[in-house]
Image: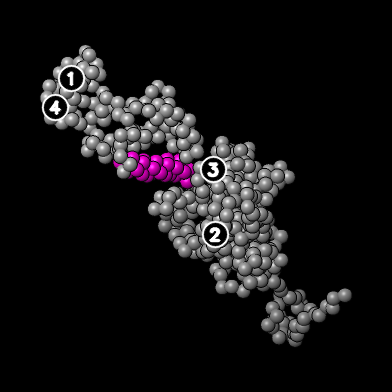
Amino acid sequence: MATGLSAVIKSLVIDRGVSEELILQTIEDFLLAAYKRRYGTSENAVVKFDNDGDKVTLYSRKIIVKEVEDDVLELSLEEALLLNDECEVGDELLIEIDPKSFDRIAVQSAKQKAKQTLREIQKDTLYSEFKGKEGEMVIGYYQRDKNGDIFIDLGKTEGILPKRFQSPREIYRRNDRVKTLIYSVEKSPSGLRIMLSRTHTDFVKKLFDLEVPELYDNSIEIYKIVREPGYRTKLAVYSNRDDIDPVGACVGLKGIRIQTIVRELEGEKIDVLKYETDPTLFIKNALSPAEVKQVYILDEAKRSALAVVSENQLSLAIGKQGLNVRLANRLADWNIDVKTEEQFLEMDIAHESRRDLDALFTDEPDDEIINIDDIPGVDERIVSILEENEIVRIEDYINMSDADLSLLPGLSENDIKTINEVINEYVDIVEEEAEESEEEYEETFECPECGYSLTDDMTSCPNCGVGLSFEEDNVEEE
């Protein structure tokens, strides 16, 4: 009965991706359903496959009795002896059933159930297979288009690339080879629904995983990716090893790695930048390719920051229709405002920030020490005592006498001596203006007659009585 099954089973395994065990189970269920339809029960039905799986046989298991009360479950001893002369009452005998004895309705009903079961098995098998691949990249071939949605042949089934998940740069033609990301896998009444995407940030991540071996072995890692599909992508990376440049590894020698990814994205711009834990440095990097002179944190609680750029870098920092700064905001997770140097100077910002900006645009060294807590080796306890008394800058400290300092609660003479020594070691105190001021106030005059010391408010010499007149000499500059 039913020979030649092996080839059919193998074909189903290959074409539909269903396991051989499930196919054999479906065939067994089909025969049992037909048997039940014919005899009213399948309790005594037995299905056997040969070792090669090439033949299947259906049996009816009956108990041998003297008098038959149920001809479906029982067999008389006389009938049993005709089949096997060693039978006895109470024995069980397997009697082969010819499927041709089943009526047409029984066969059709069983066949319909088998087909439905096979479809469900196939759906469950494909669902399990592709559900486990969510977030992974697959390669398929363009088949057809329907209302802008593209159907991609994935081999065992089809996937859908919706219009909203397509890059505006890309145009597809029939049989084009398409790389996509499996976005979601769902069951539906019409069958398996596999949603694909080329706009998700994970799609870019998978492209970098393919091109950058350092990502595979975790030598470098991707911190975050933000993207405006078809226009620009920003990628922040960092290295777990000091000897590897994360940005250089992603770009590749002469840009070969990044160029491969840009070609796959049909020319979409990609900015690869280094992730920094310091928000000011990270914001600087996030605004690339623009060169940022300085970043100021305006409100840390609200994550608001100001980036200062030169006039010729403003349009580059903001980007076309604000795209670059929008992506930088999302990447750094800060609200970034971009201003030129002139615009910043017009803003009402704290004096300390203005002083920092003035230092930025002058030739003064960047490592100038201004505050006491910037001096290396200063005891934190002494810094705290001074800050409690509103003494933060070195200038504020040196303008106070030792007597005034000794009156500060918690500050001992030894503390004053220690901080003086540290300031003398690390800080160069410029007193030129003070010296000029002192000379200006100490300027004196002598009487032309007797040489007596005079001041410029005298009208006559107190010593000899000669009349005085003070005039300022005007010296023309050549």
Of the image marks 2 and 1, the number of the one nearer the N terminus: 1
Q: Secondary structure at mark 2?
A: strand
Looking at the image, residue 287 lies above or below residue 68: below
Q: Name the N-terminal-most of marks 1 and 4.
A: 4
The secondary structure that dominates the magenta segment is helix
- Amino acid at dot 1: Glu
**In the image, is residue 468 above or below residue 195?**
below
Q: Give me the residue at 39% from left, 53% from top.
A: 189
Q: How was the colour assigned to the protein in this rendering?
A: one colour
Q: Earlier in the sequence, mark 3 or mark 4?
A: 4
- Examine the image and state in which quarter residue 461 appears: bottom right
Q: Nearer the viewer, residue 262 or 74?
A: 74
Secondary structure under tag 4 reads: loop
Expressed as whole percent of the image width and height from the top left, the position of residue 256 reads: 70, 44
Mark 3, residue position: 155
Residue placed under numbered mark 4 in the picture: 68
* Residue 200 x, y percent position in the rendering: 53, 53
Q: Earlier in the sequence, mark 3 or mark 1?
A: 1
Quadrant showing the C terminus: bottom right
Q: Which residue is mark 2?
A: 146
Of the two numbered discs 2 and 1 in the rendering, the one whose residue sits closer to the viewer: 1
Q: Which residues are magenta?
A: 106-134
Residue named by callout 1: 78
Q: Amino acid at mark 3?
A: Gly
Q: Which mark is residue 216?
A: none
3 or 1: mark nearer the eye: 1
Whether pointer 3 and pointer 4 mark residues with C-beta atoms closer than 8 Å, the reply is no
The CA span between labels 2 and 4 is: 66 Å
